[in-house]
Amino acid sequence: MGVVAFLSAKGAPGTTTTALLMAALWPAPVLLVDADPEGGDIALRLRREDGEAVDRSRGLLSLLPLARREMQPATLPEHAQTLRGGTEAIAGLSGPEQAGAAGHLWSNLAEAFARTADRDVLLDCGRVAPRSVHLPLLQQADVVVCLVRPTVSSIVHTRERLAALVPSLVAGDGHRPRMGVVIVAERPGGRDATGAAEVLERDLPGVEVFGRLALDVDGASIFEGFEIPRPERTLLVRSGRQLVIDLHAALRHEQRGAGPVPVGQPSPAAPSPAVGAAGVDPASEQSVGSGPAKSGGRRAAPRRRPFSRAGREPAVAAELEAESR
Ligand SMILES: Nc1ncnc2c1ncn2[C@@H]1O[C@H](COP(=O)(O)OP(=O)(O)OP(=O)(O)O)[C@@H](O)[C@H]1O
Ligand SMILES: [Mg+2]
């Protein structure tokens, strides 16, 4: 089906949390991969559905040696474990030592993800730079999502990192993943989030704003392994419902080669997702994995969004103007 890679430039804007949230809400069969070369967090935060700790020796660590030869995508689920709430996840490596030792195997692994036919693959790629060892994962992805907070430092680092990263993601055949940002903000509809969106769209041609997520400590604690009442009512999960629709629609359009469609609108292709996260009660009427079937091939032209500017200058944009002077 398709591959969506989540990353950040710097800091900890919520990449792992967002990847877990999206996997829990994804309206189609999905496999979550903890591919952060700095060391996987998912196995340390969440327990398996059977209550046991996630086995860290079964995951990328058991999968990468098999990538020495061409790997069949059917192998992947054998290395996954079911997290509490139902998400199928491949546990991450222990840290940069293991990630660096994997060398060219990242390319073979990326190929296997891209050829997976029976489920979408969501990758938590952690912090990424043009020289990152796991860059092939992003080059082979259909959609790349960078998490950012609406602070001057997060926006500036994201702007610089993505500007450097975009050329590195163009493959030999000219393919480039569809790229965008998701803004994690205390007030997702507020001035700062709007300002961040405008600055990034203005300064990064071809990088779009996929959506916004609520900064919500209660909601995020679910993905730290805490149990809370009515998790589906948290701001984080509620804001995630729109984002998952937009990302899923972006992925399907990218694969159809139909070119990107504007995000931020309900898509007829993506049903209202269920909540089935780690620790999140499946309170929805639909089950995870009941989404639409796969569409055709991948590889569409990159999107070039014209620069748009609001009538009034948002606070964060004004700070950025001052910073760049
Ligand atoms: N939407 C959110 N609202 C509130 N807190 C959040 C949100 N997303 C993440 N957090 C919190 O921020 C911290 C960092 O989150 P997370 O680990 O997801 O970030 P990250 O980008 O994956 O970091 P790293 O680059 O270190 O892997 C965690 O304590 C997490 O609970
Ligand atoms: Mg992380």
Image (cartoon, helix red, strand yellow):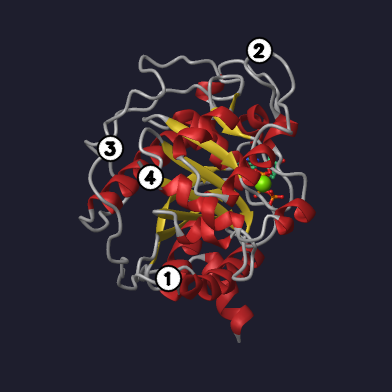
- Whichever of labels 2 and 1 marks the residue nearer the N terminus, that label is 2
Dot 4 or dot 3, earlier in sequence:
4
Q: N-terminal of the two: label 3 or label 1? A: 1
CA gap, disc 3 to disc 2?
30 Å
Instruction: Give the distance between the C-alpha atoms of the residues marked 4 and 3, in whole angstroms.
Output: 8 Å
In front: 56, or 221? 56
Amino acid carrying mark 2 in the image = Asp
Query: Residue type at mark 4?
Result: Gly
Disc 3 versus disc 1: distance between alpha carbons? 24 Å
Task: Evaluate whether residue 245 shows in this view.
Answer: yes
In the rendered structure, the answer to whether residue 294 lies left or right of residue 73 reads left
Asked if the residues shown at circle 2 and circle 1 are in contact, with their CB atoms under 8 angstroms apart, the answer is no
**Looking at the rendered structure, which numbered label has been put on residue 2?**
4
Label 4, label 2: how far apart the Cα atoms are: 28 Å
Q: Secondary structure at mark 2?
A: loop
Mark 3 is on which residue type?
A: Lys
Q: Mark 3 or mark 2: name the one nearer the start of the chain.
A: 2
Given residues 183 and 295, the one toward you in this image is 295
**In the rendered view, does 144 fall on the left or right side of 266?**
right
| Residue that appears at 67% across and 37% down | 62
Residue 53 figure quarter = top right
Residues under numbered marks 4 and 3 in contact, where contact means CB atoms less than 8 Å apart: yes
**Which label was assigned to residue 50?**
2
Q: Please report the residue visible at 56 percent of the width from the left and 66 percent of the height from the top.
A: 316
**Residue occupied by mark 3:** 294
